[in-house]
Structure formats: structure tokens, C-alpha cells
């Protein structure tokens, strides 16, 4: 699988994002572009993957900003500049991935992690009864119930789903906010915490294990619009070239970016992170008040998502020293 990733002062997040998705998608091709206002160079993170089977490409403005025209300086605020650049990047990245014969490509941010949507205790127990037994919705629900293996990848789930019924070329993944409350209640992760400590990994840099409290599902606020996973081989060149409506709906084949969790095979965890991490990005929208509004949700737990499994698999694949290097926990 592949990914298009636009970053802005996200180096600290990129280490875990790459390692996590290398294991769980499995990610084998990523195209990264840094926003013009970013003070960090993503190549510092990408270079640690030299010699692995992860193909990475880094772009500059010259590779994609010829599209759609440049916003005049001073005409819009910094965030609108970023969104304009992100749309131009997504279009050019999709063209690139199509030319590279990639199939499924994810379009998310560095604080968003793609997750297999296993059945959880907070799933509505009556939802299954409402479904027609021969419907695609019911079959998808049953498929979620069968997802037990910890080494199942997102690509495994896609292939299994395609045997049930074709997925649309632009597949919406609902998004779920993970609040800033620390992991004090997921006892199933205790073993992983012990491994992290004993082997000298930096727990503070592992958001997918450090934070597990979620906002409520199937409500627009605070998680808002979903994100998409796109089979670029099934998009026409004309569709890709058209200016995207938004990063949540980048191609005309993409439906409204909302989907019930009960009907989703894959979703996206959106990590708010700590205040230190949240405020590190220079963004006028990231005020203390905006952080506090979303920091304390505790409507559910991510324990049953089996998120800790990726870490153990990653360490097993690369060994402790190499895993620490790839995660940026030991870059000397």
C-alpha cells in the first residue's frame, strides 16, 4: 500500500506514523511534501529508512505547486495557504502513484492512524439485528466480528472485503478523535509498556499506545469529517486532474466523507496528543482553548483495537536496536 503525506513541523510524529503504517497497512511506498511554512525537514526522518523495503520520495514546491495557481501573498491566512497546497499535492501525488502502478493509497495526516475496525464492546448490540441477513452491510458486520488475528493487515481486510462486494474506488474511513488522557486503564497493554521500558524505547513518543480514550462514535463533533483511501488505478486521469473539493473529498468519486462505524471495515484514529505536541505546530487555530475543548473525552477505550500489536510486530521484524533507530528513539 501507499500514502500521500503533506507535513508541517511533524518530524516528531512521522517516526511513529511511518513505523506503524509500515506494519499495519503494510506501507511500502510513501510520497512526502513539506509545507512551505514548515521549519523542519522531513528528509531527516525518511533517511533512517534507507536500506529497507519502504520506498520513499520527497517533493518540493516545484513538483506540485504549478497546479491551480498560487494564492496571492496576504490574500488568505496561513491555514488557507496550507489547504490550497495540500489539494495541489494530493492531485499530483495521485497521478504519481497511478503512474507507479500503485493501487490503494491513503490520504491522511501524521496525527491520523489507519485502524482495522474490529468489533468493540461499545458497538451497538442491536445494530446487527436491524440488518438484512443477506445484505452487504450484514456481511461487513460479520467480517468485523471475525477479525481476531493480531497480524491481520489493512490490505488483508481490503482483499477479504472485495470478496464480499466491491469497494468503491474512493473508500471513506470514519475518523475518531483520541483525547489527551493518558493510558491508565488498558491493562492489555501492560506487557507492551514493560517491553518499551525494559528495552529503552521512548514511551512519550508512542501516541498509539500512550493515548487510548476516545470521543463518542457516530457524532460529527469532535471527530468531524472522515478521510479516504483511494484505489488510484480505478480513477480516470480526468478525475485526478480536477481540483479537489477538500482533503476529505479529494476526487469526484469520493462520497460525502461520513460513514457509520458499524458499516466501516477501516477507520482513522485522530490523535490530539499532549499540549506540548499540539502547540508545537505554528497554527493560529491551535489555541489552549481549542485543545481543552477536545482533550478530556473518555467515551470509549481503544484497548480492543489491538493497537499495541503493531509495536511488538515491528520490534520482532527489525530487532530492538534497528526498531529504536527507525522510531527516532536512538538516532545517533
Image: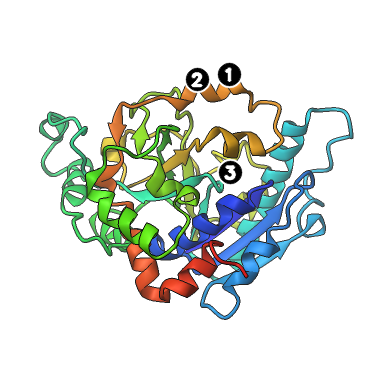
The answer to whether marks 2 and 3 mark residues whose Cβ atoms lie closer than 8 Å is no
Residue at 77% x, 48% y is 39
Residue in front for this viewpoint, 120 or 308: 308
Q: CA distance from mark 1 to mark 2?
A: 6 Å
> Which of disc 3 and disc 1 is earlier in sequence?
3
Residue at 43% across, 24% down: 220
Q: Residue furthest bottom?
A: 51
Residue 169 appears at what percent x and percent y?
Answer: 45, 52
Q: Which residue is rendered at x = 50% and y = 35% of the image?
A: 272
Which residue matches tag 1?
A: 289
Residue with the mark numbered 2: 293
Where does the image place residue 49, in percent across and percent down from the top left?
A: 57, 72
Name the quarter where the C terminus is drawn: bottom right
Q: Residue furthest right?
A: 73
Q: Nearer the viewer, residue 267 or 263?
A: 267
From where the camera sits, is residue 67 visible?
yes
The secondary element bearing badge 2 is classed as: helix
Q: Are marks 1 and 2 in contact (CB under 8 Å)?
A: yes
Q: Secondary structure at mark 3?
A: loop
* Nearer mark to the viewer, of 1 and 3: 1
Q: Residue 95's x, y, as percent?
A: 64, 60
Q: Nearer the viewer, residue 82 or 180?
A: 180
Q: Which residue is mark 3?
A: 250
Seen in the picture, residue 98 relative to 304 is either above or below; the reply is below
Amino acid at each position: 500500500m501507499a500514502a500521500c503525506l503533506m507535513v508541517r513541523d511533524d518530524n516528531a510524529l512521522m517516526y511513529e506514523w511511518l513505523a506503524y503504517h509500515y506494519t499495519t497497512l503494510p506501507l511500502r511506498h510513501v510520497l512526502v511534501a513539506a509545507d512551505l511554512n514548515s521549519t523542519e525537514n522531513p528528509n531527516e526522518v525518511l533517511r533512517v529508512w534507507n536500506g529497507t523495503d519502504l520506498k520513499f520520495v520527497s517533493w518540493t514546491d516545484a513538483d506540485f505547486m504549478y497546479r491551480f495557481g498560487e494564492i496571492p501573498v496576504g490574500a488568505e491566512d496561513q491555514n488557507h495557504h496550507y489547504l490550497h497546497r495540500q489539494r495541489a499535492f494530493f492531485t499530483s501525488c495521485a497521478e504519481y502513484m497511478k503512474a507507479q502502478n500503485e493501487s490503494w493509497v491513503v490520504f491522511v495526516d501524521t496525527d491520523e492512524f489507519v485502524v482495522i475496525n474490529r468489533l468493540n464492546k461499545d458497538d451497538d448490540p442491536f445494530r446487527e439485528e436491524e440488518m438484512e441477513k443477506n445484505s452487504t452491510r450484514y456481511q461487513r458486520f460479520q467480517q468485523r466480528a471475525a477479525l481476531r488475528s493480531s497480524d491481520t493487515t489493512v490490505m488483508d481486510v481490503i482483499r477479504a472485503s472485495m470478496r464480499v462486494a466491491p469497494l468503491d474506488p474512493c473508500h471513506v474511513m470514519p475518523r475518531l478523535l483520541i483525547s489527551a488522557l493518558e493510558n491508565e486503564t488498558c491493562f492489555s497493554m501492560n506487557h507492551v509498556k514493560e517491553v518499551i521500558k525494559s528495552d529503552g524505547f521512548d514511551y512519550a513518543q508512542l501516541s498509539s499506545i500512550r493515548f487510548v480514550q476516545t470521543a463518542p462514535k457516530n457524532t460529527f463533533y469532535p471527530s468531524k469529517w472522515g478521510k479516504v483511501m483511494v484505489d488510484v488505478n480505478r480513477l480516470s486521469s480526468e478525475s485526478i486532474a480536477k481540483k479537489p473539493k477538500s482533503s476529505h473529498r479529494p476526487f469526484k468519486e469520493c462520497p460525502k466523507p461520513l460513514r457509520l462505524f458499524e458499516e466501516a471495515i477501516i477507520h482513522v484514529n485522530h490523535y490530539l496528543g499532549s499540549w506540548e505536541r499540539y502547540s508545537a505546530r505554528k497554527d493560529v487555530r491551535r489555541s489552549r482553548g481549542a485543545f481543552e475543548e477536545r482533550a478530556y473525552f473518555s467515551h470509549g477505550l481503544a484497548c480492543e483495537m489491538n493497537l499495541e500489536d503493531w509495536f511488538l510486530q515491528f520490534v520482532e521484524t527489525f530487532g530492538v536496536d534497528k526498531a529504536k533507530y527507525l522510531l527516532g528513539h536512538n538516532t545517533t
